[in-house]
Amino acid sequence: MSAPVYKKKDFMADQLVRWCPGCGDYSILSQVQTVLSKLGRPKEEFVVISGIGCSSRFPYYMDTYGFHTLHGRAPAVASGLKVTRPELSVWMVTGDGDALSIGGNHIIHLLRRNIDLNVLLFNNRIYGLTKGQYSPTSEQGKVTKSSPMGSLEVPFNPLSLALGSGGSFIARGIDVFGKHLREMMMASDAHKGTSFLEIYQNCLIFNDHAFGSFTDREVRDEKILYLEEGQPLIWGKEVRRGLVLDGLALKVVEVTDEAQILVHDPRSKALAHLLVELDGTGETPVPVGIFYREDRSTYGELFQAQIAESRQTLGNGELADLIDSSDSWTV
């Protein structure tokens, strides 16, 4: 049976998109619609699940099945759906507040279980829907409506959190780098397990220019490090810089001999832990791409194998027998 052929417009819902003009969410929506049209799967197999926040309006704007769930609870709903309907392609859309504050407990367990679904975390370092309070990724000292003297909190690093939670695919894209973002989404879909894609997304109303120091056209060539497997960790157009190991830390050097520069290996968790800490301060770059990728059994595979083993040894069983198999009470 031949794969279905779709165009981007086939995944565009008839709903009016209600984001602020110029919001980075528009770019991400466009890329998702484009990517899903290229995956060669029937539309009815796609499901978009979200929590609460500006990003979480996503299911309304996708002509697919979807759930708009509770604040922080998208991982629970997405997990349940994928485990019971493993044939579906599940995409979970969330924000830095939704996923890392009220949803923090859920997201770490989704990652460690390695359920085969795709997480798109929109990170604008602010609460946008509730009008500009600091979020778990806002920088320390951030002045907002809820921190008029500056936030006292050290922010989460989403990729570091994902690594520490046992994530098997960890990547980063940026809303204004459309082609690269599509590539990251395609790689996320191809990965078997939980793919965690952080997307830097500009909120022009409440946190405009949050990433301008490395995304503006006049500086991006000198600040963005594209992570490519098997390629040296080099960036810069005017001045070519690279990364070398200095003891147990990364060091920025001017490139005179590429052979001395570290080569990217997304299967090295040690290297990933070093790369996720680079934030563009000083001479350091901001890496984008796949930081870490690991092939291991998914929760769904292990779950189905356990069911099969149980049926082989115990049979299908009867619900009534299960209810009567231990102490019970009649009320």
Image (cartoon, helix red, strand yellow):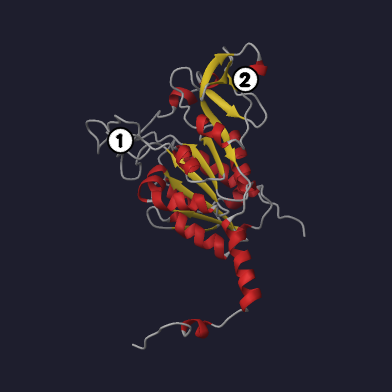
Examine the rendered structure and indicate whether residue 11 appears above or below residue 290.
below
Image quarter (top left, top right, bottom left or bottom right) of the N terminus? bottom right
Q: Residues within 10 Å of mark 2 (few under 14, many from 20)?
A: many
In the picture provided, is 108 more to the left or to the right than 207? right
Where does residue 179 sit, x and y in percent of width and height? 61, 34
In the image: residue 46, left or right of residue 96: right
- Name the residue at 52% across, 22% down: 247
Rendered location of residue 106, percent (x, y): 42, 53
Asked whether, in this view, residue 105 is left or right of residue 87, the answer is: left
Pick whichever, 267 or 176, lies toward us: 267
What amino acid type is highlighted by mark number 2?
Answer: Ile
In the image, 209 versus 320, the foreground residue is: 320
* Neighbours of disc 1 within 10 Å: few (<14), some (14-19), many (20+): some
Residue sticking out furthest to the right? 1
- Spatial CA span between label 1 and label 2: 35 Å
Given the image, on which type of amino acid does mark 1 rest? Glu
Residue 170, visible in the rendered structure: yes
Where residue 79 sits: x, y (%)?
Answer: 51, 58
Q: Farthest residue to the left: give it.
A: 149
The quarter holding residue 127 reads top left
Residue 304 pos. (x, y %): 61, 65
Q: Which residue is mark 2?
A: 261
Of mark 1 and mark 2, the one earlier in the sequence is 1
Closer to the camera: disc 1 or disc 2? 2
Which type of secondary structure does the marked residue at label 2 adopt? loop
The image shows residue 44, relative to residue 237, as above or below, that is: below
**Quadrant into which the C terminus falls:** bottom left
> What residue would you read off at disc 1?
153
